[in-house]
Amino acid sequence: MRLLTYFNLNDPKINESGKFTNSNIQALYDQLTAACSTADLALATGAYIEEYDIADLRKLLLESQNDDIKQVYNKLLNGSYHHIKAFTKVHKGRGITYNPKILTIAELNEILSK
């Protein structure tokens, strides 16, 4: 929130859970939450969201020239690495192999090996 304020940007969140002012974010949120009808689907959706975040953050890091923003992106990226590891670990414990949809298998394996 501090960066949104500092850069004079609008917060796309509405003070109602699951509601966003940005129609693209709202559509993605609605699509992803609808995909979570079982525990296994929820785990797969969670891993997919982390893949999506990782791809976006990597792209944004390459495009950004601002060190403050890069620091935030790197922290978010590190969090997404931890989250995707957790989702795939639980998947594995349930006897399911998670197959990445955005990252390559090599990229996912590199993240999981750290």
Image (cartoon, grey):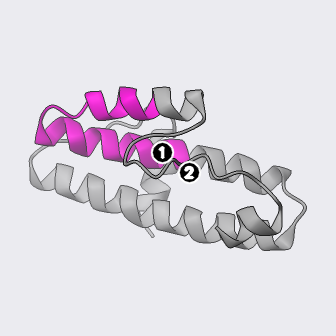
User: At numbered mark 1, what does the secondary structure look like: helix, strand or loop?
Assistant: helix
Q: Residue at x 49, y 32 (%)?
A: 26
In the displayed structure, 110 sits above or below 79; it is above
Disc assigned to residue 51: 1
Provide residue 112's location: percent of width, then percent of height: 40, 60
Horizontal relation, residue 50 to residue 99: left or right: right
At label 1, which amino acid type do we have? Glu
Residue 19 location, quadrant: top left
Please name the amino acid that badge 2 sits on: Ile
Q: Which residue corresponds to the image point at 15% horizontal and 40% vertical from the top-left?
A: 40
Q: Which residues are magenta?
A: 28-53
Give the residue at mark 2. 54
Judge the density around disc 1: few (<14), some (14-19), many (≥20) Cα neighbours within 10 Å.
many
Label 2 sits on a secondary structure element that is helix
Q: Is residue 47 left or right of residue 35?
A: right
Q: Are marks 2 and 1 in contact (CB under 8 Å)?
A: yes
- Is 52 part of what is drawn in magenta? yes
Apparent side of residue 36 relative to residue 60 in the rendered image (left or right): left
For residue 49, side relative to residue 70 (left or right): left
Closer to us: 23 or 31: 23
Q: Main secondary structure of the magenta part?
A: helix
Distance, label 2 to label 1, CA atoms, is 5 Å
- Is residue 57 or residue 104 the one in the foreground? 57
Q: Is residue 79 magenta?
A: no
Q: Residues within 10 Å of mark 2 (few under 14, many from 20)?
A: many
Q: Position of residue 15 (x, y in %)?
A: 46, 52
